[in-house]
């Protein structure tokens, strides 16, 4: 059983650790991981009011999710799960809930995923997302849930 809590400014270090424990292997494949560089990116990007911390049944932080929404779309900016909980159905559960929200609001979900993250891309495809474009590093994916 997972739950979400709103992040606060005090979660800066926690969210950086989640990033390190979730996407470091993919960043290493693309650019190489440099803590100082990644910390600078984190400083620039960190906006606690947009982040929800994913908590497990023991109240341990196991990931984070960032979404934005407009009249027609939900954009999944980040869904990061710590490596020790990946592959246990948590991402699927979170995405299914997001899909239900999108359906209830007649909105499309959009996201992008690193090309080197084949596991995440396969998960999105299993849940009905299709590739709509690509950049040098990412696949852009979306699905419509209009009633």
Image: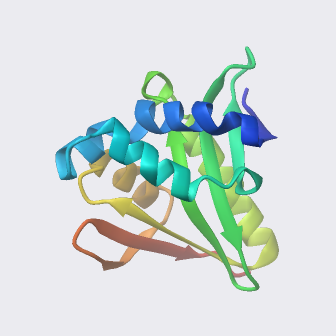
Q: Is residue 35 visible?
A: yes
Closer to us: 109 or 112: 112
Closer to us: 108 or 71: 71
Residue at 43% x, 30% y: name it. 21
Name the residue at the bottom extreme. 71
Q: Is residue 103 above or below residue 13?
A: below
Residue at 63% x, 49% y: name it. 65
Identify the image quadrant of the N terminus.
top right
Which percent across, then down, holds residue 29? 18, 45
Query: Left or right: where does residue 86 sit relative to residue 55?
Result: left
Which percent across, then down, holds residue 35? 35, 36
Colouring chosen for the image of the structure: rainbow
Closer to us: 60 or 145: 60
Query: Left or right: where does residue 146 sit relative to residue 34?
Result: right
Residue at 34% x, 47% y: name it. 37
Q: Is residue 147 above or below residue 19?
A: below
Residue at 55% x, 57% y: name it. 45
Identify the image quadrant of the C terminus.
bottom right
Which percent across, then down, holds residue 141? 43, 71
Q: Is residue 7 visible?
A: no
Query: Left or right: where does residue 1 sit relative to residue 32?
Result: right
Which percent across, then down, holds residue 95? 60, 52
Name the residue at the top extreme. 58
């Amino acid at each position: 059983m997972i739950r979400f809590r709103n992040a606060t400014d005090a979660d800066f270090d926690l969210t950086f650790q989640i990033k390190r424990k979730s996407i470091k292997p993919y960043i290493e494949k693309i650019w190489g991981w440099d803590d100082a560089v990644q910390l600078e990116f984190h400083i620039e990007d960190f906006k606690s009011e947009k982040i929800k911390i994913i908590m497990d049944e023991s109240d341990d932080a196991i990931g984070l999710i960032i979404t934005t929404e407009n009249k027609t779309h939900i954009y999944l900016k980040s869904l990061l799960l710590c490596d020790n909980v990946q592959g246990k159905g948590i991402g699927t559960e979170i995405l299914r809930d997001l899909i239900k929200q999108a359906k209830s609001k007649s909105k499309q979900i959009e996201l992008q995923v690193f090309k080197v993250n084949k596991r995440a891309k396969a998960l999105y495809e299993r849940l009905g997302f299709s590739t709509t474009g690509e950049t040098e590093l990412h696949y852009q994916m979306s699905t419509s849930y209009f009633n």
